[in-house]
Image (tube, grey):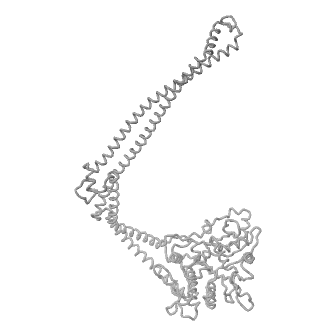
C-alpha cells in the first residue's frame, strides 16, 4: 500500500506526466469567414475556474447574478469539442443557432500528446466538423476557408479522428455491452442536471446529451469507473466473460436435463393426438377408438405398437387405406373411359358439322354464281354487241352463239317463277342445314362441359390421393417417433443426450471452479491499490473538512465501488453526499496519476456543483484544496475545469468571470423569445 498523508507524497509517487486529454484554448466565433470572435478562453493544466460575480451590496439584481450567464453552455461546448453530438438542449440549440447562424466553436486540444485544431458548427445548416493535426486554430480556419472538404469529419468518425476510441472502447461482459469514449466522457463531465446525487449518475434526460446509455443504470457506470482505474484488467474481463458464458451454458443444460422426462411425455401426447386426427381422416365415419378401428379386443397401452402391427399384418386401418386408394383408382379409370367416349362422340359430331358447313358454303356459291354469270354476260354483250366477232367474222350481236345464249338468259328472266323457285329451294336447304349445325353445336358444348367436369373431378381425386398418401406417410413417421419417446420415458438414463448432458455439466462445473479461483487470485492483486485509493480519498476528505472528525472510506463489494464520508461511523447531510461525489472524482484523478495501470484521461469538468448543499466554507475549502493539488506539480499532469457561482478565494484568479452584463455569448439568446411571448 502507498499511503498518502500530504501533497508531497502524491508528487513523489506520480508516474503520469500529462493528461490524455488537454484543452488549451476554446474560441466562440460569430463567423469564420470573415473571422469574427465572440469570446476566446485559454485554459491551463491544473485547475481552471470559471466564476461569476458574487453578491455584495452593489448588486441590485441579486436574483439572477451567477445564473443563466453561460457556465453550463461553456461546459457543453467543451463536451461537444470532445465528441458529444449535441451542445445544448433543443430549445437552447435553436436559440443559439438563430443568434449565430454562421457560428462555430473552435479549440486547440492535445490527445495522447498529439495536438489538434478543431472546428464544430453551431449555426444553422448542416456543416461537418473539421479536424487537423499539428496546426493552430487560426491556420485551420485559413486553410478551411480555401477548401474545407479536405478537413471535414462526420460525427461517426469524429472520435476516432481525435484518437479517443483507444483505449476507451472496451467490453463490459456483465452488461453484455461495449463501452466507448462518450460514456467515459460522461463520467469526466457530469451533467449539471444530475446534481451530483450519486457516484454513478452522470447524465440526465433533461440535458439531451445523446450520450449512449447503459443497459444497467448502476452496474454499467461502476464497471467503467473500475476499468478506468485499473481495477479490472484484460485477463479479468476475459475470465468474467467466460464465467458468464459457462454459467449460462450450465443453466441451459440443467433445464434441458430436467426436461428430458417431461419433453418426451409432452411430445408423445402431442403425437398421439395428431395420430388420432390422421386416423379419423382415413376412417372419418367413426369416432376414434383403438379397439374399434384396429378391431382389438381392448384398448392397447401403446397405440403405436397397435398401429404398427395393423400395418404389418394388413389390419382394418391398412384395409381402409388400401380401399380408399382402390376407390380412387377405379374412379379415375371410369373417368378415363368416359373421357374416351366423349372424345369419340365429339370427333363424330365435329365431322358432321364440318360436312353440313361445307354444303352450306356450296349452296351459297351456286346462288351467287347463277345470278352473277347472267349479269356479267349481259353487261359484256351491251358493251361489245356492235364489235366484230373474231371467230365468226360477223357483228357480235348477230353471232349465233351469242343469240342462243341471250335467248337462254331472256328465257330464264321471263320464266321468273322457275328461277325464283330454284333460289328458294337453295334457301330452304340452307335453313335446314343451319338448324342441323345449331343442334350439333349444342351437342358439342354439352360434350365440352361433361369433359371439363370429368377433368376437374379427376384433378380433385388425384389431389385426394396425394393427401391420403401423405397422411399415411405421416402416420408411419409418428409411429417411429412415438416408439423413440416411449423408450426415453421408460428410462431417461439410457438416452444418449441425457448421458452427454450430465458429462458436459460436470466438465463445465470443473472449468467454472477453476476460472473462479483464477479470478479470485487476480482480484487479490488489486488489494493494495484499493487501499491506496482509500488513502487518497481519506486524505482529500480530511484536508477539506479541516477540524472535523470525518474520514473518507472506499469499499469494494460484489465488484462494485463506493465512496463515503463518515463521522463516528454515521453518514450525515446532503452536503457530505455531494462532497463525497466530488472527492470521488478528484481522488480518481490523483490515484490515476500515481498508478500506471489506470486509463483515466486525467481530464475532469465539474459544472456548478450544488453549492447550496455544500456550505460556502466547504466550497471554498474544496477549491483551495484543488489549487493546492495543482501547485504541487511544476507542470500539473491533469486538467480540472470547475464552474461556480461561489467566488474562489481572493488569492485565486479565475480563467473567466461571467455575469448578467457579460455573458458567455455576450448576447441574450432568449431576448427574441421573451419579446415574442410578451407580445
Residue 428 image point, x, y percent: 53, 24
- Rendered view: 589 above or below 314: below
Q: Residue furthest left?
A: 297
Nearest the eye: 227 or 506: 506
Left or right: 188 as drawn, with respect to 315? right
Q: Is residue 667 visible?
A: no
Nearest the eye: 462 or 213: 462
Residue 99 image point, x, y percent: 73, 72
Q: Is residue 407 visible?
A: yes
Residue 313 image point, x, y percent: 24, 49
- Rendered view: 294 above or below 329: below
Q: Residue furthest right?
A: 34
Q: Residue furthest top?
A: 393
Q: Residue 384 appears in which quarter of the rendering?
A: top right
Q: Residue 421 appears in which quarter of the rendering?
A: top right
Q: Residue at x 70, y 14 (%)?
A: 383
Nearest the eye: 144 or 296: 296
- Rendered view: 586 above or below 117: below
Residue 403 image point, x, y percent: 65, 9
- Rendered view: 204 above or below 263: below
Left or right: 150 as drawn, with respect to 480? right
Q: Residue at x 70, y 86 (%)?
A: 63
Nearest the eye: 148 or 210: 210
Q: Residue at x 63, y 90 (%)?
A: 616
Amino acid at each position: 500500500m502507498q499511503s498518502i498523508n500530504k501533497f508531497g507524497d502524491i508528487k513523489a509517487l506520480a508516474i503520469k506526466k500529462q493528461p490524455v486529454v488537454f484543452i488549451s484554448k476554446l474560441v466562440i466565433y460569430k463567423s469564420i469567414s470573415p473571422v469574427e470572435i465572440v469570446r476566446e478562453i485559454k485554459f491551463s493544466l491544473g485547475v481552471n475556474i470559471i466564476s461569476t460575480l458574487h453578491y455584495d451590496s452593489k448588486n441590485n439584481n441579486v436574483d439572477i447574478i451567477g445564473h443563466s450567464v453561460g457556465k453550463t453552455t461553456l461546459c457543453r461546448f467543451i463536451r461537444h469539442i470532445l465528441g458529444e453530438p449535441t451542445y445544448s438542449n433543443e430549445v437552447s440549440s435553436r436559440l443559439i443557432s438563430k443568434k449565430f447562424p454562421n457560428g462555430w466553436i473552435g479549440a486547440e486540444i492535445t490527445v495522447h500528446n498529439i495536438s489538434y485544431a478543431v472546428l464544430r458548427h453551431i449555426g444553422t445548416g448542416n456543416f461537418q466538423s473539421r479536424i487537423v493535426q499539428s496546426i493552430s486554430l487560426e491556420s485551420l480556419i485559413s486553410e478551411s476557408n480555401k477548401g474545407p472538404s479536405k478537413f471535414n469529419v462526420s460525427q461517426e468518425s469524429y472520435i476516432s479522428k481525435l484518437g479517443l476510441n483507444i483505449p476507451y472502447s472496451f467490453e463490459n461482459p456483465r452488461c453484455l455491452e461495449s463501452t466507448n469514449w462518450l460514456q467515459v466522457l460522461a463520467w469526466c463531465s457530469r451533467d449539471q442536471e444530475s446534481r451530483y446525487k450519486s457516484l454513478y449518475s452522470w447524465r440526465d434526460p433533461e440535458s439531451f446529451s445523446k450520450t449512449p446509455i447503459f443497459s444497467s443504470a448502476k452496474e454499467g457506470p461502476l464497471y467503467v469507473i473500475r476499468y478506468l482505474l485499473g481495477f479490472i484488467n484484460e485477463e479479468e474481463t476475459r475470465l468474467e466473460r467466460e464465467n458468464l458464458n459457462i454459467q449460462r451454458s450450465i443453466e441451459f443444460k440443467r433445464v434441458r436435463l430436467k426436461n428430458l422426462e417431461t419433453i418426451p411425455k409432452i411430445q408423445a401426447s402431442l403425437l398421439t393426438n395428431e395420430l388420432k386426427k390422421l386416423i379419423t381422416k382415413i376412417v372419418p365415419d367413426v369416432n376414434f377408438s383403438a379397439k374399434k378401428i384396429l378391431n382389438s379386443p381392448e384398448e392397447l397401452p401403446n397405440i403405436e405398437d397397435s398401429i404398427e402391427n395393423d400395418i404389418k399384418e394388413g389390419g382394418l386401418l391398412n384395409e381402409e387405406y388400401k380401399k380408399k386408394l382402390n376407390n380412387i383408382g377405379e374412379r379415375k379409370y371410369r373417368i378415363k373411359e368416359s373421357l374416351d367416349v366423349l372424345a369419340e362422340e365429339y370427333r363424330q359430331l365435329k365431322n358432321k358439322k364440318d360436312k353440313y358447313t361445307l354444303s352450306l358454303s356450296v349452296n351459297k356459291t351456286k346462288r351467287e354464281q347463277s345470278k352473277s354469270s347472267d349479269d356479267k354476260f349481259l353487261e359484256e354483250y351491251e358493251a361489245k354487241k356492235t364489235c366484230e366477232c373474231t371467230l365468226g367474222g360477223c357483228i357480235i350481236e348477230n353471232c349465233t352463239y351469242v343469240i342462243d345464249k341471250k335467248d337462254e338468259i331472256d328465257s330464264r328472266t321471263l320464266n321468273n317463277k322457275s328461277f325464283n323457285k330454284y333460289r328458294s329451294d337453295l334457301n330452304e336447304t340452307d335453313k335446314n342445314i343451319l338448324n342441323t349445325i345449331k343442334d350439333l353445336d349444342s351437342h358439342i358444348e354439352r360434350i365440352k362441359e361433361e369433359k371439363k367436369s370429368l377433368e376437374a373431378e379427376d384433378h380433385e381425386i388425384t389431389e385426394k390421393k396425394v393427401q391420403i398418401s401423405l397422411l399415411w406417410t405421416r402416420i408411419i413417421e409418428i409411429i417411429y417417433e412415438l416408439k423413440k419417446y416411449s423408450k426415453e420415458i421408460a428410462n431417461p438414463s439410457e438416452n444418449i443426450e441425457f448421458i452427454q448432458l450430465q458429462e458436459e455439466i460436470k466438465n463445465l462445473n470443473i472449468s467454472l471452479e477453476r476460472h473462479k479461483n483464477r479470478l479470485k487470485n487476480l482480484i487479490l492483486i488489486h488489494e493494495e491499490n484499493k487501499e491506496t485509493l482509500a488513502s487518497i480519498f481519506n486524505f482529500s476528505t480530511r484536508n477539506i473538512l479541516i477540524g472535523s472528525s470525518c474520514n473518507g472510506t472506499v469499499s469494494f463489494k460484489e465488484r462494485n465501488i463506493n465512496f463515503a464520508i463518515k463521522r463516528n461511523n454515521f453518514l450525515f447531510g446532503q452536503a457530505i453526499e455531494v462532497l463525497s461525489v466530488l472527492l470521488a472524482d478528484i481522488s480518481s484523478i490523483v490515484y490515476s496519476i500515481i498508478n500506471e495501470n489506470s486509463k483515466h484521461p486525467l481530464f475532469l469538468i465539474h459544472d456548478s456543483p450544488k453549492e447550496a448543499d455544500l456550505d460556502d466554507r466547504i466550497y471554498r475549502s474544496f477549491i483551495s484544496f484543488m489549487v493546492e493539488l495543482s501547485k504541487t506539480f511544476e507542470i500539473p499532469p491533469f486538467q480540472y475545469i470547475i464552474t461556480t457561482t461561489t467566488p474562489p478565494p481572493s488569492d485565486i484568479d479565475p480563467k473567466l468571470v461571467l455575469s448578467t452584463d457579460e455573458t458567455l455569448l455576450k448576447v441574450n439568446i432568449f431576448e427574441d423569445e421573451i419579446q415574442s411571448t410578451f407580445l
